[in-house]
Image (tube, rainbow, N blue to C red):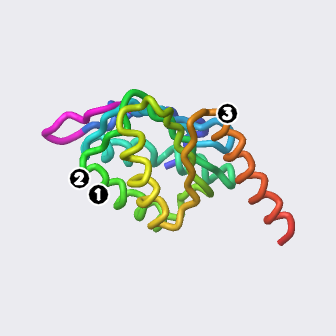
Amino acid sequence: MPIKLNPHHTTDEFAVGEFKPHGLVEMWLEGNVLRYDAVGPFNRELVRAISKAQHDIMLAAKARGACVEIVTIHESALVTPDGLAELALILEDVNQQGLAPLAVAYVMAADVEGAGIMAPLFRKRYQDQGRIFQIFDRMEQATVWAQAQLDAAGAQAADE
């Protein structure tokens, strides 16, 4: 199956199972940045839909070379415990497939419900999988940091 050059999905397109996903995530590529725009709260079914929706986007990103992720969370960052467990499995699977980005930035303003509670839980899931991970209050900060990760990888590749 050929790789789509500019895939763009929402989790609603990939929802399956007896329970309805809570939350919505839209995802697409901007150059070498995988963008996720998420509205929570989130349950396990939503996390599973993310896994399916992001697959061809991750393949397209890998075809472009080094990439980073920026995940923007709106309204609520709360995730059910089984949703967090599913996230850990998905991150491990992405690593095993060789599709993991160089780094992941979450953008969660302080007024996002559960941001303070969820930040260390998100950080642990990503760091347990060896991912470079950072959380920011504003998109501008995340964008600068993500570009610095890409620049550093490019410089390292040029040195090799």
Mark nearer the N terminus (3 vs 1): 1
Q: Nearer the viewer, mark 3 or mark 1?
A: 3
Q: Nearer the viewer, residue 115 or 91?
A: 115
Compared to residue 24, the image places residue 132 above or below, namely: below
Q: Amino acid at mark 1?
A: Ala
Disc 2 to disc 1: CB gap under 8 Å: yes
Instruction: Give the residue at the far left of this rendering.
Output: 18
What range of the chain is rendered magenta? 16-24
Q: Position of residue 155 (x, y in %)?
A: 83, 60
Label for residue 53? none
Question: Is residue 9 found inside the magenta-colored segment of the image?
Answer: no
Q: Is residue 111 left or right of residue 87?
A: right
Task: Give the Cα distance between marks 2 and 1.
Answer: 5 Å
Task: Give the Cα distance between marks 3 and 1.
Answer: 30 Å
Q: Position of residue 57 (x, y in %)?
A: 52, 44
Q: Nearer the viewer, residue 63 or 136?
A: 136
Based on the displayed image, in which of its 4 quarters is residue 25 positioned? top left
Disc 2 to disc 3: CB gap under 8 Å: no
- Identified at 56% across, 36% down, the residue is 137
Task: Give the Cα distance between marks 2 and 3.
Answer: 32 Å
| Residue matched to label 1 | 85
Q: Position of residue 70 (x, y in %)?
A: 57, 42
Q: Position of residue 1 (x, y in %)?
A: 49, 49
Judge whether residue 148 can be spotted in this image: yes
| Residue matched to label 2 | 82
Q: Amino acid at mark 3?
A: Glu
Question: Is residue 21 found inside the magenta-colored segment of the image?
Answer: yes
Mark 2 residue element? helix
How dense is the environment of label 1, judged by Cα within 10 Å: few (below 14), some, or many (20 and up)?
Answer: some
| Residue matched to label 3 | 140
How dense is the environment of label 2, judged by Cα within 10 Å: few (below 14), some, or many (20 and up)?
Answer: few
